[in-house]
Each structure stands twice: as structure tokens, then as C-alpha cells.
Image: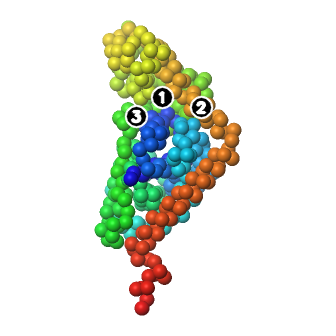
């Protein structure tokens, strides 16, 4: 029995970094049909932990993220897609788990630490943000998920869940399932750099290609990409390492793309070798990357446009998914209350 759960904070549209880092894999897992259940959660309540003064952003992006999910091929017949805040059981679980975690433990969590630094909260760190790893433990355990596909940056958060599960089970009896992280298939996919070569694609830096981008936008963005700054003339030897164009190629290109778009080479190794030797211009490589991205992203964009025309159907999928998730979480919450013996009125031994 295997249950997969993943989620995204709805703070913006999804980009190709999300696609190679997690969405593509999720759709493969879904279609492989090996998991018994797949839950995909839009983590709006977690997004509030650093957007309490901008709820409108979270509210509108729920639909954007959902459109991106459906566009990538997540299928409501196979995966339960739902909205976190519609599952109040998660709050109750969080409330109990909070007593199994120390302040010092959260302060040491490397993910929390670095995210606090990145955000530079004015007026201090909200308690809700500081404690989000505890609520994430509720997200995961409420569905008895044993596999959680996440990026490497989330590993300390997952470790926190595992500690909570172990503490809970040893204190109150075997109740919760201890999950395992499933990491992206390789390092390139785990963290796609921005178009400018920056460490990460981020909306605020304006260095992303979005799944919703038009064909023209993709083309313009690829043309604007940074390459190897030492590769001044075509004849100069070039570097493929730390060269965003080659990093994107590693994440996207397959040998059949060479046959279709650049038959002078068999595979990426050959193309890289030529670039490193000198004599291969950035224009040729960018043109190839553009062809691949157009080929891969066009069907996604078209599916997105189809769903955009039928937002009531998208809403219905989310509502049904949230109902299913509610029932599932309710079962686990019931077990948790029993394990903690909080079921006083159903327990004849409590008052006699
Ligand atoms: N913290 C995750 C992120 O920022 C989102 C998330 C919330 C999540 N709850 C989760 C991921 C549960 C996996 C499992 O991407």
C-alpha cells in the first residue's frame, strides 16, 4: 500500500523549474498506476504563513496552480487534487503535534532558517511561518502518505515530520505512517537556474519561463538567456558547466529531439563536446533549445487554454477533491484522537 502526497504553495504561476523538478515526475507516477492513492494539495494555508497581508495573491493563484496541474496532465480520475484550507482536520493535528516539537528544534531547521533569511520579514517572523514544518507534518500524516516527492530543500522539513511520527507513535501507540522523501531524478532537475544564470527561477527576479507563456514569449526568453561569458567568438572554446542553456538542455532534451531538430548531432554529449572545443555558436544551441521547449510546452499550454475556458469544471474538480481529502483526513484524525484518548464521551472507562 503506497500513498503519495505532494503540494505547492499557490503564490504564483508554475514555471519550467517546477515542471522538471516535480510536475513531470508526478504525472509519470500517476500514469504508472503503481501508487494506491495520490494526493496533490494546493497549500493555501501554508502560503498564508508569509502572505497574511496579501491574501488576494494566494486566492487568485489557487486557480492558476490548478490550471498548471491540469495542463501538465494531472488527472482528477487518478489523483485527488484539493485545497489545504478546506481540511480543518489539519489544524487540529497541527495543534497536537506542536507539543512534540521544541522551539529549539524548529530554530535549528535549515529550511526554516534559510527561508526566514530570504524573506526578510518586516517586524519579525510570524509564529505561523516559524511553525509551518509542524503543519506540514499534519498535511502528510493526515493522508497516511508514505511517499512525499519534494525538492532537496524540503528534506529537513520532511525529517521534522518523521520525528513527529516517531514521537507520536512511541508515546500514544502505533498510529501514524512515517513518510519517505522522493527526490527529483537528478541535480539538474532539482534546481533549474534562472534565465540569467541566477541560482533559482523566481517571479521577483523576472527570470522564469512559465508553463502559460506563449510561443513568442518562450522564444524571446530563450534568446535573452545568459550563456558562457567567456565564449565571445564562435571559434572560442566554450563552457557547458554553469551555462544555463546547456543546463536546460540536460533537463529537457532527449535523443529524439536531435533527430527532429538538430540531426547533425546524435546526442547532448556530442553537442557539448563541439561547444567546448570551439566552433559552435550560442545562436545554434539556443535555437535548438527553443525548438525543444516549444515542442514540450505547446501541448501543456493548449491544455491549459482549454481548461481556462471551463473554470466552473476546474472549480468542481477542486471541490470534489477537497471533499474526498476531508473524508480521508477525518479517518486519521479519529484514530489520532483515540490514540491520545481524547474520545472521553465514547470511553466508558473515563468516568466511572
Ligand atoms: N512546503 C512545500 C513547498 O514549499 C509545500 C507543501 C505544503 C508540501 N505541504 C506539503 C509539500 C506536504 C509536500 C508535502 O513546496
First in residue order: circle 1 vs circle 2: 1
Q: Nearer the viewer, residue 97 or 168?
A: 168
Of labels 2 and 3, earlier in sequence is: 3
Residue located at (45% from left, 64% from top): 332
Q: Nearer the viewer, residue 24 or 11?
A: 24
- SS type, badge 3: helix
The residue at the far bottom in this view is 352
Name the residue carrying label 2: 301
Relative to the observer, which residue lies in front, 46 or 322? 322
Q: Is residue 47 above or below residue 329?
A: above
Secondary-structure class at tag 2: helix
Query: Residue at point 61% right, 31% down?
Result: 302
* Residue 160 makes an appearance in the image: no
Q: Nearer the viewer, mark 1 or mark 2?
A: 2
Q: Secondary structure at mark 1?
A: loop
Question: Can you identify the residue that label 3 sits on?
Answer: 189
What is the spatial separation of the Cα atoms under label 2 and label 3, in whole angstroms?
A: 20 Å
Q: Which percent across, then down, holds residue 96?
A: 42, 69
Q: CA distance from mark 1 to mark 3?
A: 15 Å
Q: CA distance from mark 1 to mark 2?
A: 20 Å
Mark 3 beta carbon near ligand 1 (under 8 Å): no
| Residue under the image location 37 percent in, 45 percent down | 182
Q: Earlier in the sequence, mark 1 or mark 3?
A: 3
The image quadrant of residue 210 is top right
Res 195 label? 1
Amino acid at each position: 500500500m503506497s500513498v503519495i502526497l505532494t503540494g505547492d504553495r499557490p503564490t504564483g504561476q508554475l514555471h519550467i523549474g517546477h515542471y522538471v523538478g516535480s510536475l513531470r515526475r508526478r504525472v509519470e507516477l500517476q500514469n504508472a498506476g503503481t501508487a494506491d492513492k495520490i494526493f496533490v494539495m494546493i497549500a493555501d494555508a501554508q502560503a498564508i504563513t508569509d502572505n497574511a497581508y496579501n491574501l488576494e495573491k494566494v486566492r487568485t493563484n489557487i486557480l492558476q496552480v490548478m490550471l498548471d496541474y491540469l495542463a501538465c496532465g494531472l488527472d482528477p480520475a487518478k489523483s485527488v487534487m484539493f485545497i489545504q484550507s478546506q481540511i480543518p482536520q489539519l489544524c487540529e493535528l497541527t495543534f497536537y503535534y506542536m507539543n512534540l516539537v521544541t522551539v529549539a528544534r524548529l530554530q535549528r531547521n535549515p529550511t526554516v532558517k534559510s527561508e526566514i533569511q530570504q524573506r526578510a520579514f518586516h517586524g519579525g517572523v510570524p509564529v505561523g511561518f516559524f511553525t509551518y514544518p509542524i503543519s506540514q507534518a499534519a498535511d502528510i500524516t493526515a493522508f497516511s502518505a508514505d511517499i512525499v516527492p519534494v525538492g532537496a530543500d524540503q528534506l529537513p522539513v520532511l525529517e521534522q515530520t518523521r520525528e513527529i511520527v516517531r514521537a507520536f507513535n512511541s508515546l500514544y501507540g502505533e498510529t501514524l505512517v512515517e513518510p519517505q522523501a522522493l527526490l527529483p531524478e537528478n541535480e539538474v532537475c532539482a534546481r533549474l537556474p534562472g534565465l540569467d544564470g541566477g541560482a533559482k527561477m523566481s517571479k521577483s527576479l523576472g527570470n522564469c519561463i512559465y508553463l502559460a507563456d506563449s510561443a513568442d514569449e518562450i522564444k524571446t526568453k530563450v534568446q535573452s538567456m545568459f550563456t558562457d561569458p567567456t565564449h565571445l567568438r564562435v571559434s572560442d572554446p566554450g563552457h557547458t558547466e554553469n551555462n544555463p542553456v546547456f543546463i536546460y538542455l540536460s533537463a529537457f532534451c532527449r535523443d529524439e529531439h536531435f533527430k527532429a531538430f538538430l540531426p547533425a548531432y546524435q546526442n547532448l554529449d556530442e553537442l557539448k563536446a563541439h561547444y567546448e572545443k570551439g566552433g559552435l555558436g550560442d545562436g545554434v544551441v539556443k535555437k535548438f533549445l527553443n525548438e525543444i521547449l516549444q515542442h514540450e510546452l505547446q501541448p501543456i499550454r493548449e491544455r491549459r487554454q482549454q481548461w481556462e475556458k471551463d473554470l466552473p469544471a476546474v472549480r468542481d474538480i477542486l471541490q470534489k477533491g477537497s471533499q474526498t481529502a476531508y473524508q480521508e483526513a477525518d479517518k486519521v484524525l479519529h484514530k489520532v484522537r483515540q490514540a491520545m484518548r481524547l474520545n472521553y464521551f465514547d470511553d466508558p472507562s473515563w468516568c466511572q
